[in-house]
Image (cartoon, rainbow, N blue to C red):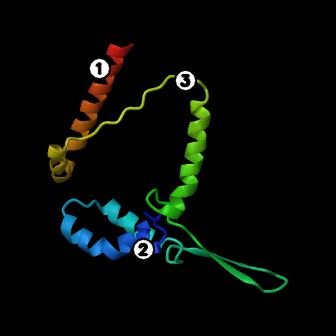
Amino acid sequence: MEPITSSKYQIKAIIIDHIDAFQSTYLWRIREQTLKVFSKIIKCKSGQLWWMSYQCDTCDYNKIVCFTCKSKLCCSCSTPMTNRFTNWLLSWMSQDINYYHITLTLPEELRNFRFKYRSYGSFQILFDAANKAITQFFRRSV
């Protein structure tokens, strides 16, 4: 299997190609913040977010630099952040420190409930349950 190198598989291209279908299918589940992030990713490095122009005093060469969206989902913006985090994590892990990596997953049966009733404190209930589970885990393992 050949590696995917085409720009049509980039997150930005996927969002542009499928944003309408995504919105019509998941409209009741999409947060306003999600749509804002998608909009920023679409505009990333296009000059629509903002840009700076640099001009050489000697030869009048003009360079326009388009600003980025700085989103964690954007491939071109997240790479520097990921590299910084990876370097920090590697330096932290090389200190011979014992640690736990815990992943909490919401059962599939409760996912629609969470989206439908998000304004009724469902997140707080989930965070309280996660806190209780982690606390019990550490009390038993120490």
Measured as percent of width and height from the top left, residue 69 is found at: 50, 65
Measured as percent of width and height from the top left, residue 107 is found at: 20, 41
Q: Examine the image and state in which quarter residue 65 appears.
A: bottom right
Residue of label 3: 97
Tell me what residue is drawn at x 20 percent, y 71 percent: 24
Of callouts 3 and 2, the N-terminal one: 2
Residue of label 1: 136
Of callouts 1 and 3, the N-terminal one: 3
Of callouts 2 and 1, the N-terminal one: 2
Tell me what residue is drawn at x 14 percent, y 45 percent: 109
Give amino acid for label 1: Gln
Q: Secondary structure at mark 3?
A: loop
For this view, does 79 lie left or right of residue 61? Answer: left
Q: Secondary structure at mark 1?
A: helix
Q: Are marks 1 and 3 in contact (CB under 8 Å)?
A: no
Disc assigned to residue 8: 2
Measured as percent of width and height from the top left, residue 108 is found at: 18, 45
Q: Secondary structure at mark 2?
A: helix
Given this view, does label 1 or label 3 mark the residue nearer the observer? 3
| Residue 50 appearing in the image | yes
Tell me what residue is drawn at x 31 percent, y 72 percent: 19
Q: Quadrant of the N terminus?
A: bottom left
Given this view, does label 3 or label 2 mark the residue nearer the observer? 2
For this view, does 66 lie left or right of residue 16? Answer: right
Q: Using the numbered discs, state the Cα–Cα distance from disc 3 to disc 2 in whole angstroms.
A: 42 Å
Q: Quadrant of the C terminus?
A: top left
Give amino acid for label 3: Ile
Give amino acid for label 2: Lys
Given this view, does label 2 or label 1 mark the residue nearer the observer? 2
Measured as percent of width and height from the top left, residue 76 is found at: 53, 64
Badge 2 density bin: few <14, some 14–19, many ≥20, Cα 10 Å: few
